[in-house]
Amino acid sequence: MKNNNLTIQDILNLLKKYLKITDFSLVTESFNYVKTFIDDESLLNDYLEIASILTTVYADIETISSSFLYHLLVLEKVTDKEIREKYNLEVSKLVIGAYKLDKIIYSTENDYLVEYYKKVIVGMSEDVRVIMINLANRVMNMRHISRLKREQAKKYAKESLEIVAPIAHHLGIYKIKSELEDLSLKTLKPDVYFDIVEKLNSTKNEREKLIQSMTREVKKILDDNHINYEIKGRSKSIYSIYNKLDKGRKFNDIYDLFALRIMVSDEILCYHVLGLIHAKFKPIPKRFKDFIAMPKSNGYRSLHTTVFGVNNTLFEIQIRTFEMNEVAENGLAAHWSYKENRSAATLSSTDQKLEFFKTVIDNYQLKADQANAFDEFKDEKMHGNIYVFTPKGDVIELPNGATPIDFAYKVHTKVGEEMVGAIVNNKIVPLNYTLQDNDVVKINTNKSSSPKLSWLKIAKLNQTKNKIKSYFVKERKEEIIEFGEYSLVKYLKKKNISQVGFFKEENIQKILKELKCKDLNDLYLNIGNNKFSPKTVCEIIYPSKEENKHLKKDISIKNNTDIHVAGISDIHVNIASCCNPIPNDEIVGFITKNNGITIHRKNCSNIKKTERLIDVTWSNSTKNMYLSRLKIYTNDSSSHLTDIISKISNLGIVINNAITCVNNLKFNYELSFYVRNTIDLENIIKMLSKLDYVVNIERG
């Protein structure tokens, strides 16, 4: 329902269609409570529209009520304490959870996306209904995106497409996923969107005639065999059509524009109907998929087949039970909407379906390789996977290219950690064996065994790699804590900051609160793991003004100290940040209009096409420290940043900044540090070049 003039009675009427209860007072009371603080009719109507969207996925009364109430926290009309005092624990948790998600700052940059997914999934793990409220709110805003300015709208649509729609997909809520994708495409690429709409409209009559004709044929088959069924034409979303066109397909060649969905009472009938359809219409073998025997990770179950239908037109036909259809339409939401009628079996089924998300949560809690973990979570679209079996016949879904190591960790982390070998189809295979569809896999374990670092090069799933890394991180925890403490103390010494003053109790408590660390060891662990830099920790107590002065002194120096400018005395010289020259480098001066002379390396590309140059030389005895940069490339898919920083620090070099980059699953690093001259730099390069995992070093 997209009516702009909804009432609370409209919402109650929608709820009564699927909830077998008589008391809806909580919904009415919560909406009236919101109205005591908000008299803006447009805002209230937005809240009612969010509630109407939630009814399409069978939300319960607690969810509907919470979808009204959490806006009071967003607008700071009430406090979470007041919500807890007025409403029961279940509603309070939903309201506060929805409010926390609403406060997240969206971004389509990877680093922020990882944090966003982490918070969203953790929120969902506590109660999936919190996510449902967030999704419904997003759909409502996308429907009214014209309220935003063009650039804001494009940013919001991009977030919806890249961040929010994938969550709806993984929850299996395809109606919300499809609407978000279509609305996003309409905003981001309106020409493409309306071109597809126009093509659909121009072929509508022809398509409807073909679908009606095929429907009659299928109905006759089912009626002749006395099968109780329901049959529907299935519409293809505009965004899914765009995806196929974007891959080079022609509009007329998208065969699943013609699609039917058949619902029957039980699984056996699904296969019976499939046989009847294939007996009448010739199937395309490679287009048959059995998601009943091997469900998708988000709980989706159905039979899919593509056949040559009437007029030799290709039709995609989906066959499922009524219950499967409910889950297919509403995902996990189909299970929590009928709370009062849920059996233990249903609860167990829901828990199994949530297991997929719990593994993702574990993945993020490892705090390792999060950018790669995000890529895996974002890119997985429930296709291109294989299905393998345990010896007991349980189905395990894995991506193409997965190995027995991935299988073992998918079964259980403990199985992975104690794995000593694998048997596939009754034959011993190496751990780098690529699993195939329908393989039966047995993992041999030994309690005294443990993971090997070499597994990181064999495993396919980032989730598997992160669990392996986590094992080694835990093993080295004390060493990392010690290194973190050493790094912070060294930074304080470099800045001439008193350790006694810095480590005052009030300062420590302020740092722990700001960075959300449990204690000093937790802080040192995060510094050692490069989550926080010593500079970040220090600036909580001492803001960066003094730091900026220090940096300025390093890059802007008076002549007659380290650099001589030909024929000129007493002039400011600045060190160019593009090439970072250091003593012993061949250098040249660039004459600026208002800021003295800027010193570049002679091979710097930025000064090759200018004539405003002047001869400069280094003094025989330089006094300052100079910033230099290196790019370090490795052949390893595990992080060695702590080791690299430790080795550079042991040379007495002060590290300014360190950035980790991941390319093709290989870790690379960009480091900046202060050196006296090229001799220091050469010593660093020579030392790093001896490391087994380093394949190339470039000066920045």
Image (cartoon, rainbow, N blue to C red):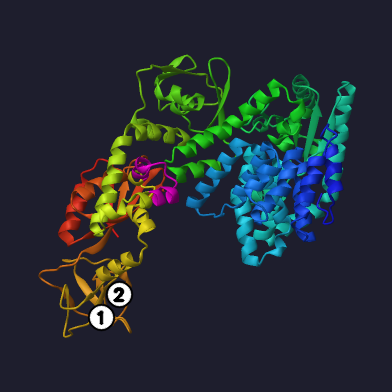
Residue 397 rendering spot, x and y as whole percentages = 56, 29
**Relative vertical location of residue 647 with respect to residue 226 in this rendering, above or below:** below
As drawn, 118 above or below 619: above
Q: Residues within 10 Å of mark 1 (few under 14, many from 20)?
A: some
Range shown magenta: 509-526
What residue is rendered at 56% in x and 55% in y? 105
> Which numbered marker is on residue 613?
1
Q: Position of residue 235 (x, y in %)?
A: 77, 44
Kindly identify the residue that appears in the image at 48 percent across and 26 percent down.
407
Q: Let me know if residue 524 is in the magenta part.
A: yes
Q: Mostly what secondary structure, the magenta segment?
A: helix
Q: Is residue 483 left or right of residue 617?
A: right
Image disc number at residue 122? none
Queried whether the magenta region covers residue 390, the answer comes back as: no
**Can you see residue 411?**
yes
Image location of residue 178, percent across then percent down: 70, 46
> Which x, y percent locates residue 334?
73, 33
Please tell me whether mark 2 sits on a helix, a strand or a loop. Answer: helix
Q: Tag 2: Cα neighbours inside 10 Å, few (<14), some, or many (≥20)?
A: some
Residue position marked by numbered label 2 in the rendering: 607
